[in-house]
Amino acid sequence: MKHIKLDQVEEKELYPGFIARIIHTKLQSISYVRCLKGAVLPPHKHAEEQVLNLLEGEMNVTVDGRTVHCKAGDVVHIPSNAVHTVTAITECLAIDLFAPQREAYIEYGTRTF
Amino acid sequence: MKHIKLDQVEEKELYPGFIARIIHTKLQSISYVRCLKGAVLPPHKHAEEQVLNLLEGEMNVTVDGRTVHCKAGDVVHIPSNAVHTVTAITECLAIDLFAPQREAYIEYGTRTF
């Protein structure tokens, strides 16, 4: 067992206005992200599938050219290698799940293994 | 892309007092769990690794005989095949992540694939 207190995990500003605390297991990465109001995540893609769980706030999420408006309680599945971008309409809190491990972030946060 | 509104996902009482909405991707399962105050999850184990993310409330989590007291913002990694149990001290809201897919729950909830 590993017991982690999130506020003891270092914060990393992944992109301007997107501040994350990241946990890696052997099989997945979990990114707790605070998005500042108005922050825009530039279009990008990665091989890992992503599941965005919006806990607080409102954002627009665009995946492969289709945009959805998300509120707290919304979940967006972003397939492997789909180009996606996010615009935070308000300040937001989200949990992004990646499987397998999000390779580009492996140096940040903490690990369970 | 798949856009899911959690309140449109069916609820399933996995154990008495543990009510979940579950999303399965090809690589992982995500279980949004509401735990009633005083509910006790009986000791069990499974091959899938589990990451318990406590969003609201307080609970005791026991894994392979070691108990930790958890509050909102705590994360517990439960390794593959570790025997674990949970006691909800207050009403709680948690997100349980499983990788690979939680086979025993595959018939519940919704799928992204």
Image (tube, coloured by chain):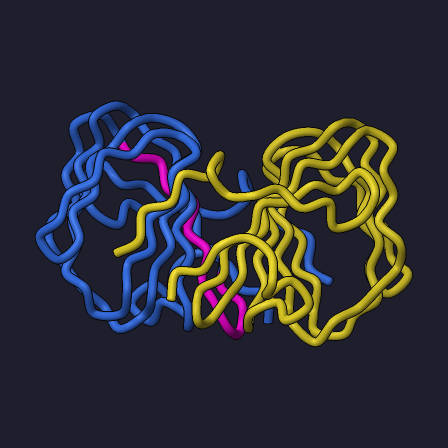
Chain colours: A yellow, B blue
Residue B72 location, x and y as percent?
40, 30
Task: Using the rendered view, name the quadrant where residue A50 is placed.
Answer: bottom right
Task: Using the rendered view, name the quadrant where residue B44 is placed.
Answer: bottom left
Q: Does any portion of residue B11 appear in the rendered image?
A: no
Viewer-side residue, A84 vs B1: A84
Picture quarter with the N terminus of chain B: bottom right
User: Relative to B67, does residue A103 appear above or below in the rendering?
Assistant: below
A8 left or right of A76?
left
Count of picture labels: 0
Residue located at (21% from left, 40% from top): B68
Residue located at (41% from left, 44% from top): B53
In magenta segment, residue B108: no
Viewer-side residue, B42 vs A98: A98
User: Relative to A111, does residue B68 appear above or below in the rendering?
Assistant: above
A99 left or right of B96?
right
Specify the principal SS of the magenta part. Answer: strand
In magenta segment, residue B30: yes
A63 left or right of B86?
right
Residue B104 location, x and y as percent?
29, 67
Which residues, given as a range, are shown in magenta? Answer: B24-35
Picture quarter with the C terminus of chain B: bottom right
Task: Using the rendered view, name the quadrant where residue A55 is placed.
Answer: top right
Q: Does any portion of residue B63 appear in the rendered image?
A: yes
Residue B16 location, x and y as percent?
18, 41
Residue located at (63% from left, 30% from top): A56
Residue A34 location, x and y as percent?
67, 36
User: Relative to B18, does residue B51 appear above or below in the rendering?
Assistant: below
Residue located at (50% from left, 43% from top): A9
